[in-house]
Image: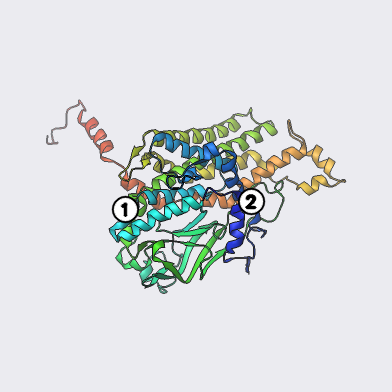
């Protein structure tokens, strides 16, 4: 089956009738529901774009000969990596990088674990074959995927097995001849319910010991599996026009708690079962985290380009671009952009073939970028907010401009240097939706925790950094001190 179109994506969702709840009600048709219709249309646009630029976004399947999505391709050369990145950024530009869980993110994970399938054979050769076949199935059917990695925040001071309700987190209930039964809660599936399937994988950051074997699982199931529910948070798409809410009306992905009520998972869909050691090592040893980071940094470059464009447009709109402090703030964003581009260049051009046969980027460069961006992103949106100043509060709606009595007054009174009032307010509403709306606040929070707790990520980064050479540098420097040592210091 070739790569799907936007129409086919929407039809699949309608047919699947995923069990999704929001605002206290079950959703009948996710493609028409006010909370999801904007983002599902944006997702459909991504799939249509594949056919508008097939020479760039599709490639020939090695098993069927069909044209399938380039983001599923296992890279064998540096040129393959660059081609994947260009497709990732083509998709990211449709949203200004504001869709953090566009399909290419999970495609990168499934591609890597499929190529590294033999890793899962450590527990049972069956699991390796499952991973390999699932990658091919996802690629050939152009699946849209969501995933869930973490347990509920009950008591972070205790392991799951030590919780007062040890069964609240997703856990293994029973092994049967045909599969497993799982039950409990998992967090936090972005695009939960508006995708084809759910991947349950271990955390990239939180590690477990053998006491947590019952909670150490990895598997994939359709989102309409019996007993599976997606419990969505309040929607930040308030049903406004794209003029009034240019980002939240189109790219509000949603986040969902995932509830499993004695859900059956057939053995062919299981990759890890009750093995904390394998879960702890999955992302690192398969290099999935490297390829996922490649997608994220690619997306974040586009996101930074978009933020810079908004900042520069505000400067021009109200004639503040000649002021030193304004130029300095613009320079801050430019420095972030060029630094991210440099990380990407190093990651791609220092890439090497890994043990699984994948051309894998230099993780040192990507790891630095993925640790840094959550820390710097709040500053980027703060700059836009500061530049917009009171203009981010003086933003009438499109309906105000269309009112015969006040529209002309607003158009004249809110004009900019080179824009009429209608055009300037449209720009400032975009800046507001990026920085101050519920959607904008969620973006900042989302980026901060994208790969997990940044402090814990920083500790991991610090522990893994090669430090000795730098300490030796200082030690050797001090040894070359030409001055004589005091007599009381022994040689």
Snapshot colouring: rainbow
The disc at residue 41 is 2
Judged from the image, the secondary structure of the residue bearing numbered disc 2 is helix
Residue 276, given in percent of the width and then of the height, sits at 32, 62
Look at the numbered discs 1 and 2 and tell me whether their residues touch, using CB distance below 8 Å.
no
Q: Dot 1 surroundings within 10 Å: few (below 14), some, or many (20 or more)?
A: some
The disc at residue 118 is 1
Residue 301, given in percent of the width and then of the height, sits at 51, 38
Observer-side mark, 1 or 2, equals 1
Residue occupying image coordinates x 39% and y 52%: 456
- Horizontal relation, residue 341 to residue 125: left or right: right
The disc at residue 300 is none
- Horizontal relation, residue 244 to residue 59: left or right: right
Quick check: can you spot residue 372?
no
Residue occupying image coordinates x 77% and y 38%: 421
Q: Dot 2 surroundings within 10 Å: few (below 14), some, or many (20 or more)?
A: some
Q: Nearest the camera: 249 or 229?
A: 229
């Amino acid at each position: 089956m070739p790569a799907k179109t936007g129409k086919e994506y929407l039809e699949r969702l309608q047919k699947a009738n995923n069990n999704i709840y929001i605002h206290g009600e079950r959703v009948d048709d996710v493609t028409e529901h006010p909370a999801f219709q904007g983002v599902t249309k944006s997702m459909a646009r991504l799939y249509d774009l594949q056919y508008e630029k097939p020479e760039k976004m599709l490639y020939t399947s090695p098993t069927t000969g069909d044209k399938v999505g380039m983001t599923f391709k296992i890279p064998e050369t540096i040129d393959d990596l660059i081609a994947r990145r260009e497709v990732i950024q083509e998709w990211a530009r449709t949203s200004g990088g504001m869709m953090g869980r566009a399909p290419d993110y999970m495609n990168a994970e499934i591609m890597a674990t499929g190529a590294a399938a033999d890793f899962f054979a450590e527990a049972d050769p069956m699991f390796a074959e499952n991973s390999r076949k699932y990658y091919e199935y996802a690629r050939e059917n152009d699946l849209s995927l969501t995933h869930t990695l973490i347990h509920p925040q009950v008591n972070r001071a205790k392991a799951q097995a030590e919780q007062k309700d040890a069964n609240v987190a997703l856990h293994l209930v029973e092994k049967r001849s045909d599969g497993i039964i799982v039950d409990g809660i998992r967090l936090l599936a972005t695009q939960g319910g508006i995708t084809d399937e759910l991947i349950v994988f271990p955390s990239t950051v939180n590690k477990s010991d053998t006491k947590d074997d019952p909670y150490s699982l990895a598997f994939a199931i359709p989102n309409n599996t019996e007993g599976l529910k997606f419990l969505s948070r309040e929607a930040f798409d308030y049903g406004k026009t794209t003029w009034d809410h240019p980002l939240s009306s189109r790219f509000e992905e949603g986040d969902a708690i995932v509830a499993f009520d004695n859900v059956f998972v057939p053995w062919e869909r299981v990759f890890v079962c009750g093995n904390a050691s394998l879960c702890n090592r999955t992302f690192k040893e398969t290099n999935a985290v490297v390829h996922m980071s490649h997608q994220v940094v690619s997306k974040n470059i586009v996101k930074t380009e978009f933020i810079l464009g908004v900042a520069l447009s505000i400067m021009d709109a109200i004639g503040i671009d000649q002021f030193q402090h304004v130029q300095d703030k613009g320079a801050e964003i430019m420095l972030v952009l060029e630094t991210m581009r440099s990380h990407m260049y190093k990651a791609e051009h220092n890439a090497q073939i890994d043990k699984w046969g994948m051309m894998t980027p230099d993780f040192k460069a990507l790891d630095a970028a993925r640790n840094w961006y959550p820390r710097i992103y709040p500053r980027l949106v703060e700059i836009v907010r500061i530049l917009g100043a009171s203009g981010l509060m003086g933003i009438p709606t499109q309906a105000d401009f269309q009112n015969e009595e006040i529209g002309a007054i607003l158009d004249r009174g809110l004009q900019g240097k080179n824009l009429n009032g209608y055009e300037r307010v449209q720009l400032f509403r975009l800046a507001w939706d990026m920085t101050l709306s519920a959607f904008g606040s969620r973006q900042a929070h989302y980026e901060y925790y994208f790969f997990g707790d940044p402090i814990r990520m920083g500790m991991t980064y610090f522990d893994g950094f090669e430090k000795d050479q730098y300490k030796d540098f200082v030690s050797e420097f001090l040894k070359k001190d030409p001055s004589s040592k005091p007599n009381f210091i022994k040689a």
